[in-house]
Amino acid sequence: MNDGVGDGAVDGSAAGALSIQGSQRLVIKIGSALLADDDGNLQTEWIDALAADAAELQRAGTEILIVSSGAIAVGRRILGLARGPRNRALRLEESQAAAATGQVRLAHAWQGALARYDVSVAQILLTIEDTENRRRYLNARSTIATLLKLGVIPVINENDTVATEEIRFGDNDRLAARVAQMVSADTCVILSDIDGLYTADPAHDTGATHIAEVHAITPEIEAMAGATSNEDGSGGMVTKIEAARIALQAGCRLAIGDGRIGRPLKAFAAGATCTWFVPQGEPQTARKRWIAASLNPIGTIVVDAGAAKALAAGKSLLPAGMIRVEGTFERGDPVIVRDDRGLEVARGLIAYSSSDAGRISGLKSSETEAVLGYRGREELIHRDDLVLS
Ligand code: GLU
């Protein structure tokens, strides 16, 4: 075993860290094979059981997001595209049509299952661009944050109808990890048809052993993923490892486990076998490191002494504290915050374009709507999007 792989023993301190219990924000990714049978019929009993688990975790204080596959599997049956060999590859436009049709059924199933626990759902369909373009990323992030605050469970899928081959995730494993990163989730669970990662393919190699804990995605881990076959969805183990890589960078722990067991989330909380990928830092730290290091600031906000002091105390930057704007930028772009002596105070992602920021400079948050003609965010830079220099 190399350094990246634990020996499977989970000591007392790690046990707390390696559980979905106590998670503050949990992304649950569910593969198509769990949601629909071979003929594309929705597995309503399974969905009901998962909804019971999700509602229970939510009651215990965990915010839940569900990344649900299955739209294409369900839609192709409804459209009569399932005939012939079951897994005949659909043409792109056929799978997009199937996704559009199946998504309605899927969302309806989740809505019905969670309504029994008085939990509302919201459908969110994302493309890669929504997770990479900063402006759209910020919009999606704050919409999801608002839904979570209101106790709603977002049910998320790729927007397959508009995502063409070259620009799509194609698998919901990486989408789930991107969502986890976007909302700074601390835990992501990928429910699959295998209970995690093995040293070799357990279906063909009796010497294959289960890996309980991974701390880094090494070439050795990648090779194991290549050897582990599973039938679930379009991803297989390779995209699950890619998802784990994204999650680890985002400071989010990620588990891959078998969702076919009854009440799977409950079972994982009780310690059912799965593979945990364990990050070095916390989600907020990872996000801030990302803002501080990898972004190239393209504008400057000059603030007064009071605002500089408030930022140092961990507050958000409000329009009232701004003296002027320098440079040209869009909403979501990275900017530097300087004080009136020119000293760098912080860096962050700004919630307004340079022209709009200029117009509301020095105004109280309650006065900005009249000037802009729309109701923008209260903060010019939210503290979650801000790193002190
Ligand atoms: N977005 C696809 C669907 O809902 C699933 C992708 C995957 O299998 O991971 O059908």
Image: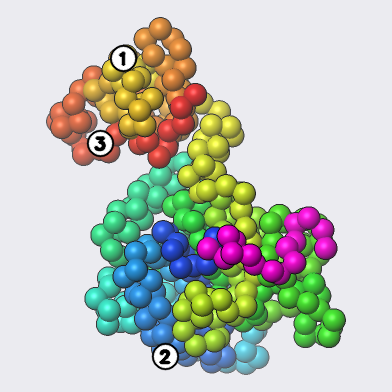
Is any part of residue 122 visible from this angle? no
Q: Which residue is mark 2?
A: 45
Residue 102 drawn above or below residue 215: below
From the viewer's perspective, tell me whether residue 356 is left or right of residue 229. Answer: left
- Viewer-nearest of labels 1 and 3? 1
Magenta extent: 1-16
Question: Mark 2 and mark 3: span between their CA atoms?
Answer: 44 Å
Do the residues bearing badges 2 and 3 touch, measured as CB atoms within 8 Å?
A: no
Residue 213 image-quadrant placement: bottom right
Which residue is denoted by mark 3 in the rendering? 378
Principal secondary structure, stretch drawn in magenta: loop
Give the class, few, some or many, for how many residues have Cα within 10 Å of label 3's Cα (few <14, many ≥20): some
Residue type, label 2: Glu
**Dot 1 lies on which element?**
loop
Please name the residue shown 59% across and 64% down the image: 12
* Secondary structure found at label 3: loop
Which mark sits nearer the N-terminus, 2 or 3?
Answer: 2
Would you say residue 267 is visible in this rendering?
Answer: yes
Residue visible at 45% across and 12% down in the picture: 343
Q: Name the residue tied to disc 1.
A: 304
Q: Is residue 209 left or right of residue 175?
A: right
